[in-house]
Amino acid sequence: MSQAGTKKINLLDLSSDKMKEFLLQRGEKPFRATQLIKWLHQHLADDLDQMTNISKSMRADLAEIAEIKLPEIVLDKASADGTHKWVLRLEDGNCIETVYIPESERGTLCVSSQVGCALDCTFCSTARQGFSRNLTVSEIIGQLWIARKTLQPDPNANRAVTNVVMMGMGEPLLNFENVVDAMSLMLDDNAYGLSKRRVTLSTSGVIPALDRLRDRIDVSLAVSLHAPNDALRDQLVPVNKKYPIKELLAACHRFLDGKAAREHITMEYVMLEGVNDKDEHAHELVQTLKGLSVKVNLIPFNPFPDTRYKRSSNNRIHKFYEILSNAGMVVMTRKTRGDDIDAACGQLAGEVKDRSRRKIHFAKLEQEIT
Ligand code: SAH
């Protein structure tokens, strides 16, 4: 608390634009914002006193009203395959999870956007815990800050985190403003400087927010499709009842038209034995996606306790892959990583402290954010 008794501003909550605004209000020059952003996100400073090119008096002044606060690391688990999972405790006691997946050419960080999730996808363990709240900008960007700091204590050393995917807990488009501000820091050359091709937002398909995203920030897009028709998608991804496939694909077309740099959208397709993995589903998928520039990413289902689903066999996944590939589609099969530490896609559980809001339906949630 500051002297006036009001809550201090967490400097990690501010995008570059907001940092400029904040400092201008205090009579500071715009270049100070660049200096602060660099200290926070390139040098990974967690104390104002580390900022040696900022005068002592300005630092003292800032300390009165601002602070640098990160989530607390309660667990840092490394898998045999090099995958890392962090469990982070937030100020209110809720916990979220972040996963780092190293590959030969890149290192991908899977970032959470909400505590829990309201969307109720039937094959996802995060859905089980319901929705608690949106993450703040500092809680989202803090995940990248912590990963960089842990994996790469020397910021000049090789770049351990080269890619970020908003594929952790939560639906990023239902936490729109904070996710956009956090992604703007990921892209910012004075902060993390990641290429827009290496920052990917994954969504179940909240169409109005998808259109807003196109107008606000240029990042890559992944869509959790998981089914070739509405009847099946209604069961797996219930938000489909509100935003059905045809409308979703029209929004995908608009997204690609919006920015010249965007070449394709990744379509995620979880492989569930006997549910969506038959030959007929693959043939139907080819028809459904006709005319849209996509890469299809087949994700072997990652099981969790009490789930009704099973992972498709490798043979089945291969056959499905071949049907799409023979039809001329670009297809990848995602390698399952980190499942020995429950760090695989859809296994992020976190811990929701306040369960009172968990039954909030996403439609209500949308009203809240718009
Ligand atoms: N809400 C966003 C992002 C979070 S989920 C979205 O729906 O896209 C990230 C990806 O993991 C999504 O494609 C999701 O459908 C997939 N996923 C969820 N549970 C899974 C599981 N148990 N096994 C494999 N993939 C899963």
Image (cartoon, rainbow, N blue to C red):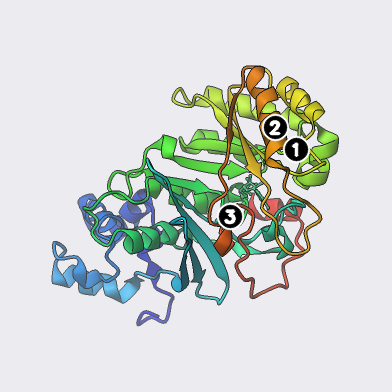
The residue that appears at 46% across and 55% down in the rendered structure is 81
Q: Percent x, y for residue 11?
A: 35, 63
The residue that appears at 60% across and 47% down in the rendered structure is 173
Q: Nearer the viewer, mark 2 or mark 3?
A: 3
Q: Percent x, y for residue 75?
A: 48, 72
Rendered position, 89 above or below 36: below
Mark found first going from the N terminus, 1 or 3? 1
The residue that appears at 58% across and 22% down in the rendered structure is 293
Residue underneath mark 3: 344
Q: Kindly tell me whether mark 3's CB lies below 8 Å from ligand 1.
A: yes
Mark found first going from the N terminus, 2 or 3? 2
Tell me which amino acid carries mark 1. Answer: Tyr
- Give the structural element (helix, strand or loop) at label 1: loop
Alpha carbon separation for disc pair 2 and 3: 26 Å
- Mark 1: few, some, or many residues within 10 Å (few <14, many ≥20)? some
Residue underneath mark 2: 248
Residue underneath mark 1: 243
Residue contact at pointers 2 and 1, CB within 8 angstroms:
yes
Residue 253 lies left or right of residue 49; in this view the side is right
Quadrant of image for the N terminus: bottom left
Alpha carbon separation for disc pair 2 and 1: 6 Å
